[in-house]
Image (tube, rainbow, N blue to C red):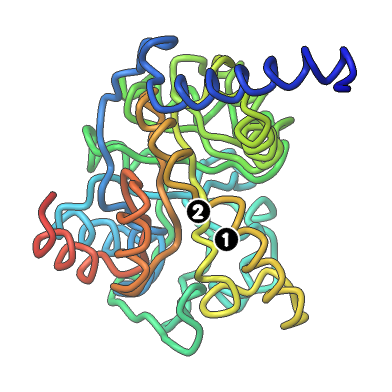
Amino acid sequence: AMSPLLYYALPALGGYIMLSIFFLRRPRLLHTPWVPAFCPRLGAHRGGSGERLENTMEAMENAMALRADFLELDCQLTKDGVVVVSHDKNLLRQSGLNKEVSSLDFENLPLYKEELEVYFSPGHFAHGSDRHMVRLEDLFRRFPRTPMSVEVKGENEELIHKIAGLVRCFDRSEITVWASEKSSVMQKCKAANPEMPFSFTLSRAFWMLLLYYVGLLPFIPIPEKFVFSFLPTIINRTYFPFSCPGLNQLAAMVSKWFIMRKSLIRHLEGRGIQVIFWCLNEESDFDVAFGLGATGVITDYPTALRRYLDNHRT
C-alpha cells in the first residue's frame, strides 16, 4: 500500500508543478510588468568595435548612423578624476603602453593603436581615423537621448559616484543601465543612483536560473530590468572563456542546456525584463538569439545586425 507520505506528497507536488507552469506562462497574473523607457534591438559593443576602433567617438557615430538602439560601454577613472570609456584598466592591449588608466591624467592618455583585434571575432581587426579615448561626459553630451549600458568592473566608489552624478546631470537615469558581474559592485551602483535600471549580476543570474528550475520563479519579485547574457553557442567558436578546449566544449554544452530556454525568456519578457545576448557577430547567431525570443543583441558589427533586422522585420 502507498505510504501516507506519498499519498499526500505526490498530489501536492503535482499541483505545485501545474501551478508553477501556469504562472510561468502567465506572469502578468502575479506581476505588473515594468514598462521600459526603450527597447534595444541593436546594441553596439564598445560602439561597434569591429567597424571602428573600440570606444572612440567615431565608433559611436558609426553605430548611431546605423540606427543603433543603445551603446554598450565600460568605464575607468583617470588620475585626475575623469570618467573615460575604456574596457581595460591597463592600456597595453589597446594602446601599447603598459600603464593603468588610473595612473595618468586624461590629457596624457595615449592614442589607441592603429588597429585592434576584435575580441569576439578572433583574427579580425578594426581600424579607424579616430584614435582618441573619450570621456563619458562627451558621449552624454553628444548623444543625450541614446540609451547606454555602463559596466563597472571594479569596486571603485569614486568612479561609481561620478558616473551616477553625470547620469543625473544629463537627466538620463531612465535610459542608462547599471551593469556589473559582481553583486558587491552592483550594490554600490544602486546606492549611488537608484533611479537607474540595472542588470543581473552573475550570482543573481545563477539564483534566477535556480528559481526557474525548482519552479519558484513565477512567485518571486525581480528588481532587475535587464539580462545581459552570453549566447552559449558562441563558446568555443568566437568566445573562449577557458584556455582548455575541453573545458570550453563542456561549458558550451552545459550552458546551452541551462540558459537557452524559450519558456524562461518568454516569462522574463512578460514581466518587462529585457533579455539581451552578447556578443554576436554572425547572422546564424542573430537567428538563434531572436528565435529564443530575445529583446535584442549586442554586436561588434552594427552594419550586419542592422541589415539582419531590416530583412527580418518582426
Residue at the spot of label 1: 256
Q: How many residues crowd mark 1 within 10 Å: few (<14), some (14–19), many (20+)?
A: some
Name the residue at 78% across, 17% down.
9
Name the residue at 30% across, 54% down.
290
Which amino acid is tagged 1?
Answer: Lys
Camera sees residue 243:
yes
Could you tell me residue 137's position as x and y percent? 38, 38
Residue at the spot of label 2: 260
How many numbered marks are there? 2
Name the residue at 23% across, 59% down.
63
Vertical placement of 186 versus 57: above or below? above
Residue sitting nearer the eye, 22 or 88: 22
135 relative position to 88: left or right: left
Could you tell me residue 43's position as x and y percent? 32, 52
Q: How many residues crowd mark 2 within 10 Å: few (<14), some (14–19), many (20+)?
A: some
213 relative position to 234: left or right: right
Could you tell me residue 88's position as x and y percent? 60, 60
Image marks 2 and 1: residues in contact by CB distance under 8 Å: yes
In the image as oriented, which residue stretches furthest toward the bottom? 123
257 relative position to 276: left or right: right
Q: Quadrant of residue 149 in the image?
A: top left
Which amino acid is tagged 2?
Answer: Met
